[in-house]
Amino acid sequence: MHRFGDAAARLYGAAETLLAWRPDEFWNATPAELGLALQAPPADGPDRETVDLLLRRFPDEARD
């Protein structure tokens, strides 16, 4: 039989290593959020062409 503390320590270790979560992020996440985060493949950022397209399509407005 596993104890809650043992399971929590293993899950926190995974969240810390794989997700770079700090303790407060781990303890404030729901079990569903943790499960989804651990299953999700790492996201690659957009390529430069996509960034340039988005910048042209959605320019920042000048703010005074």
Image (cartoon, grey):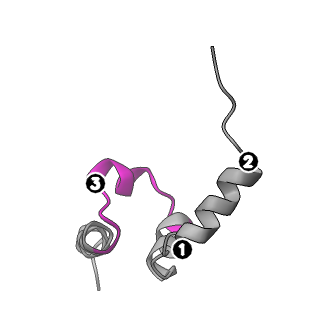
Mark 3 and mark 2 lie on one chain; the one further toward the N terminus is 3
User: Dot 1: what SS?
Assistant: helix
In front here: 60 or 17?
A: 60
Mark 1 and mark 3 lie on one chain; the one further toward the N terminus is 3
Residue 29 falls inside the magenta stretch? yes
User: Dot 2: what SS?
Assistant: loop
Q: Are marks 3 and 2 in contact (CB under 8 Å)?
A: no
Residue 21 falls inside the magenta stretch? yes
Magenta span: helix, strand or loop, mainly?
Answer: helix
Image spot of residue 1 (x, y percent): 29, 86
Tell me the residue that label 2 is attached to: 58
Q: Is residue 42 left or right of residue 11?
A: right
Image spot of residue 26 (x, y percent): 36, 57
Q: Are marks 1 and 3 in contact (CB under 8 Å)?
A: no
In the image, which residues are magenta?
18-32
Residue 10's disc is: none
Tell me the residue that label 3 is attached to: 22
In percent of the image, x 23 and y 69: which residue is there? 9
In percent of the image, x 73 and y 47: which residue is there? 58
In percent of the image, x 63 and y 13: which residue is there? 64
Q: Is disc 2 surrounded by few (<14), some (14 to 19) or many (20+) residues within 10 Å?
A: few
Mark 2 and mark 1 lie on one chain; the one further toward the N terminus is 1
CA gap, disc 3 and disc 2: 34 Å
Tell me the residue that label 1 is attached to: 36
Image spot of residue 15 (x, y percent): 33, 69
Depth check, mark 2 against mark 1: the one in front is 2
CA gap, disc 2 and disc 1: 30 Å
